Amino acid sequence: GNWARLAAQQSLTQDQLLQFDTFGNVSLIHVTDIHAQLKPIYFREPEVNIGVGPNKGEVPHVTGADFRRLYGIDDGSPSHYALTYNDFSSLAKTYGRVGGMDRVATVINAIRADRPDALLLDGGDTWHGSMTCYKTAGQDMVNVMNALKPDAMTFHWEFTLGSERVQEIVEGLPFAALGQNIFDAEWDEPAELFKPYKFFERGGVKIAVIGQAFPYMPIANPGWMFPEYSFGIRDEHMQEMVDEVRAQGAELVVCLSHNGFDVDKKMAGIVKGIDVILTGHTHDALPEPVLVGDTILIASGSNGKFVSRVDLDVRDGRMMGFRHKLIPIFSDVIAPDAEITKLIDEQRAPFKAELEEVIGQTDDLLYRRGNFNGSWDDLICDALMTEREADIAMSPGVRWGPSLIPGDPITREDIWNVTSMSYGEAYRTEMTGEFIKVVLEDVADNIFNPDPYYQQGGDMVRIGGMGYRIDITKPQGERISDMTLLKTGEPIDPAKNYVVAGWASVNEGTEGPQIWDVVENHIRKMGTVTVAPNTSVEVVGV
Amino acid sequence: MAEGVKPRVKVPRKAGAGEAVTIKTLISHPMESGQRKDSDGNVIPRSIINRFTCEFNGESVIDVTMEPAISTNPYFEFEATVPEAGEFKFTWYDDDGSVYEESKAIEIG
Amino acid sequence: GGAAALVAMLPKGAFAATTEEWIAEFTGGAEMADSGIDLTAPEIAENGNTVPIEVSAEGASEILVLATGNPTPGVAKFAFGPLAASQYASTRIRLAGTQDVVAIAKLGDGSFAKATKTVKVTIGGCGG
Ligand SMILES: [Mn+2]
Ligand SMILES: [Mn+2]
């Protein structure tokens, strides 16, 4: 509100946020994982983000006060609010909402004022995550992003629009759709629709941007929606592409990646010759680049909350130096770009009444990010158990979805922002205790396998109605123990059947009401939402 | 006999004499493993392609013995030497006795 | 007799029930070197029903591929003819779950080499 705007403006100015001493001869602008958030939102960063194997204790697996200490961030400062989770609700009242693509537009325009030929690169997860995006099959985001004039993009959730729709959009894109690891599944050849790389001539420098789409698409998302394609990390092919562009005279090689941070970090150690990896997928926001050999990794957050600017000095075919800034998009401080505001409003207009209808109110902070249950997830699990009459609920460990602060109304749009997807059916089924354990073990290994190439970059499946203990240091099959049915306090019986409700199944033909309707019905009945702290998961081995 | 079995192969039209070429083959076939059960709980009998061969002008390039663990619509990729102009002959042998054949000519140039 | 005729018609897998038996039959019990053969397979299978694998062993006459965690481990045996430009082949295989895939080459000098790769077959879901 106005009070927040005043408070934010007292401690911050747009000029401060945009301040940058232009450097070298090339500028890169990176946005990623916007998840269709056109308007300003709140977004709380994770409290629990565990690193395993070589990444234990390494960024981005540092949170809260440790993160602030590492980067010299003062308590209560704007950076504290933007980059860490502590005191989130009270700092949200001071500093207000973040993001909004009209504010992002202002920042991009300001960078282009300094450096007219700056490259704007979109790391993907753009055409997914809101009601308007769902109802227009991604068209709202395509329209707004096209107006920002990106130079290239790579992909993940976009494919959940189905390959036919993806093809329709990509064929009309006024910029490069890249993915060196997007292959035709039938003949195992690079897919024709997506190019591996594109050359740009900027500041007298020949730049190659190589795309890297999310490697585990058909595993993390429903493969039946895009059966024509095969993905994978394909780091050997990445090396071939780097060698190919270098042979063609590339002086700067940029990888626009949706691998996830730890996978990119491992890849940077294997593939030689990449100067900059613009990372995405794992939604990490880092105020400084991470160096792996001669490669710098840039992590630009999610949900429209940050824009990264990277200025590079490229001389004699070599990157001689860089200057970087992770720019937080404080929506009350950065003036919206009027043209983009108008465009956003046009996209939303047909759905305005539906979006804005107030369903309930929250007395507690609703957030999602973190390796284990967030309060939004607990609310969704409660909705599943109540509305679908289940013993146990399962909710996917996705990293998108804005936060709401105590006292906020919950609109239909807010519910869609944390649930919208093209396979949102809320199933109800029976699973044996043994199978539930298999599911937990399987997902846990996708997060806590010490080799990043075996990680998929999501978080642990959120469980309602059941407690468990997890030792992250153990191998798959031995991490999960002490599974307990909360309503009886009894141990889960491997042989017994339990009624499980969940959503976002990757299996074709899953039936049930859409999850946003299930959650809306539940919140409507509650009126005012409160979420008790979740103490049912005991994590050891951290 | 498996229905609608259709072989497809990718071979370059031309090669230099003695040059190596990459060959890709696909054949539509359910490759019923003999390990699945139908809705009544009866085992669906095994019915697979059990052998694939590629010859060039009558001389062997590759001869593959296939087990039920080969996926539906078997795919193979391999490399052949082309000593002279001639014809690649591809043959798939089905459990049911059917033999499926495909051939591709290649020029030297 | 009748029984022998029937057995002769059964696929080879029916004899060699275990991975060890398959290997013993292929190598005759010979030692296997751990270099001289490359096996490429994804860390995580996109679909356990169709997992791409590549085998390559310079100078090999034959390469045997086994899926050690399947109900029957046999996958394929590649025999390279005189017109094979390389002793390389790629195919797609079924894996019943997370397991080791093994490839063994019979090399030109009659010796054997073995490579192993763990492929994870996951239920899937979730994501960032
Ligand atoms: Mn994302
Ligand atoms: Mn993603």
Image: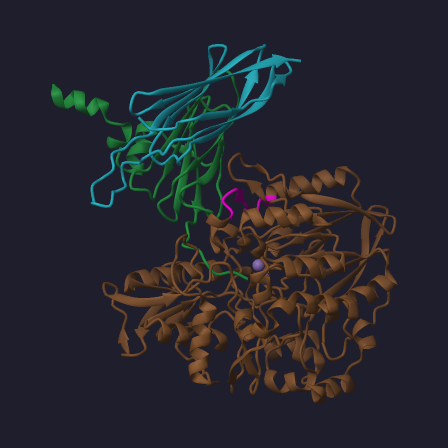
Chain colours: A brown, B cyan, C green
Front in this rendered view, residue A91 or A478: A91
**A349 in relation to A87, above or below:** above
Quadrant location, the N terminus of chain A: bottom right
Residue A246 seen in the figure? yes
Front in this rendered view, residue A464 or C7: A464
**A228 in relation to A523, above or below:** above
Q: Is residue A476 left or right of residue A74?
A: left
What span is in magenta? A226-235
State the residue at coordinates (61%, 55%): A258
Q: Residue A311: image x %, image y %?
A: 81, 60
Q: Residue B20: image x %, image y %?
A: 59, 20
Q: Main secondary structure of the magenta part?
A: loop
Residue A63 colored magenta?
no
Q: Return the residue found at the far left.
A: C1
Q: Return the residue found at the far bottom.
A: A3
Q: Residue A410: image x %, image y %?
A: 54, 80
Q: Quadrant of residue A147?
A: bottom right
State the residue at coordinates (80%, 80%): A13
State the residue at coordinates (56%, 83%): A409
Q: Quadrant of ligand 1?
A: bottom right
Front in this rendered view, residue A481 or A513: A513
Q: Is residue A113 left or right of residue A280?
A: right
Q: Is residue A457 left or right of residue C67?
A: right
Q: Quadrant of residue A478?
A: bottom left
Residue A228 colored magenta?
yes
Residue A378 seen in the figure? no
Q: Residue A44: image x %, image y %?
A: 59, 76
Count of marks, rendered view: 0
